[in-house]
Image (cartoon, rainbow, N blue to C red):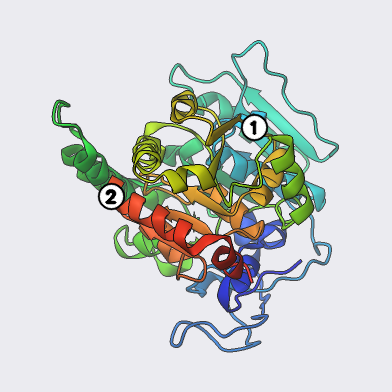
Amino acid sequence: MQSSMGSGFYGFRGFCTILVLLSVLSSISILYWSHSSVSFYFHEQRPEPGVGPGLNHPTDLLTFPLAWNHLSFPSNPPQRLLKIALFVKKWPDGCHAGGLERHALTLHLALAKRGHELHIFTTSSSDSNFSFPKYPYGNLYFHLSKPTGAGYLDQALVWEQFRAQNLMQKPFDVIHTESVSLMHTRSRNISNLAVSWHGIAYESMHSDIIQELLRAPDEHPANRLTERPIKVVEEIKFFQNYAHHVATSDHVGDILKRIYMIPDDRVHIILNGVDEHVFKPDHQTGQDFRSNFGIPPSKSLILGMAGRLVKDKGHPLMFEALKQLFVENSTFRETVAVLVAGDGPWGARYKDLGPNLIILGPLQQGQLARFYNAIDIFMNPTLRAQGLDHTLLEAVLSGKPLMATKLASITGSVIMGKEVGYTFSPTVDSLKKCLYEVWEDGRGVLEQKDA
């Protein structure tokens, strides 16, 4: 398994296969390697002119200006086993996990599998039906604490747990916090700490603008547009209290350096980790998935969506666009099927569009992998400019082209050209135009984007 940049869609699939990268160096291991003299090499293609060294040239990771996904890392066993602490608000609950939790799960299970000693500081669940998962790793330890009334980690309690473990045998080599799970008041002066960001206030301003433009005339204006800049200023101030920052998109990396004024050698871009052993092209499982759900051969185009089926993920927009297309064009209605995986209120509403919409509910990881192989293109109508959805990377690894909202994190790290997929503005008209373009291109053109 390797990570490299190549040409076309296949090259981008290689670009996204980063589980080994995260396992070997990861957003946590930055701090250990930052004090060593280890150099790594480009595997294939040169970076863009003027932004880095050339082919097979050693580079300093701390000053590398691009996403680490451009680099090739060894898959050899680690030379040194690390003691690692992770702070995460919530540990994933099966198929209901959000992006941040899935990032924590994928990354830290991979690190445990490689032999590192992992200590996870997270909240216990108040759900009596929730059974905390068990993993086959003797080097993976969970330290649970009761959440605050707002659902966050109790900072005083979790800090005492951390300090106790830090005094046992040996101190932690590196400390990782997913977003502000460990507050900046605690992270100050910890030099071997990295925080990973899955959405920051500056990105949220774009989301606020979109929501205001889509606001119905009878809805009251939100205060977000006037309040958000204050939040940005607050973040700029307290972000300085985190030693190292991992941006999960190229766009956020640029914002952290330019707008938040964090020194370049403290900002590192690593796209979210996706397990390429699970998410990979498999034509037969896709065919079986279609058969299991009774999708007839007359459906010449299978569209797919996955994730949280809520308003800010753009589902009202998608609902209205599909509704209009089904009314306006009977051929479109007769030849298109839409598979919808995930949970949320818009799952039930999609059923109102008729038999063209097949609502699958939330899927476990293995089922989700088969879902991607069953569709011709993956659609993500999100209105959230924050972060970078895992679903886009999972679909790419499964060999599928993409159709998504024209947001900076997506166009800057994923859909960087027509060879990868399609983008649209967050309006019904733009979305309808994009859907028509995909439909008119058809399965043959879409398969070429996976060539």
* Residue that badge 1 annotates: 95
| x and y, in percent, of residue 29 in the image | 65, 58
* Residue that badge 2 annotates: 429
In the rendered image, the residue lying farthest to the top is 128
Q: Which residue is at a point 62% across and 87% down the rendered structure image?
A: 57
| x and y, in percent, of residue 253 in the image | 42, 62
Position of residue 427 relative to residue 270, above or below, is above
Question: Mark 1 Cα within 10 Å, few/some/many (few <14, many 20+)?
Answer: some
Nearer to me, 242 or 297: 297
Q: Which residue is at a point 79% across and 52% down the rendered structure image?
A: 284
- Residue 26 left/right relative to 179: right
For the residues labelled 2 and 1, the Cα–Cα distance comes to: 33 Å
Name the element at disc 2.
Answer: helix
> Looking at numbered disc 2 in the image, what kind of residue is underneath it?
Asp
Work out which quarter of the rendered image holds the N terminus and state it: bottom right
Q: Which residue is at a point 71% across and 31% down the rendered structure image?
A: 142
Say which quarter of the image contains residue 212: top left
| x and y, in percent, of residue 191 in the image | 53, 54
| x and y, in percent, of residue 90 in the image | 58, 30
Work out which quarter of the rendered image holds the C terminus and state it: bottom right
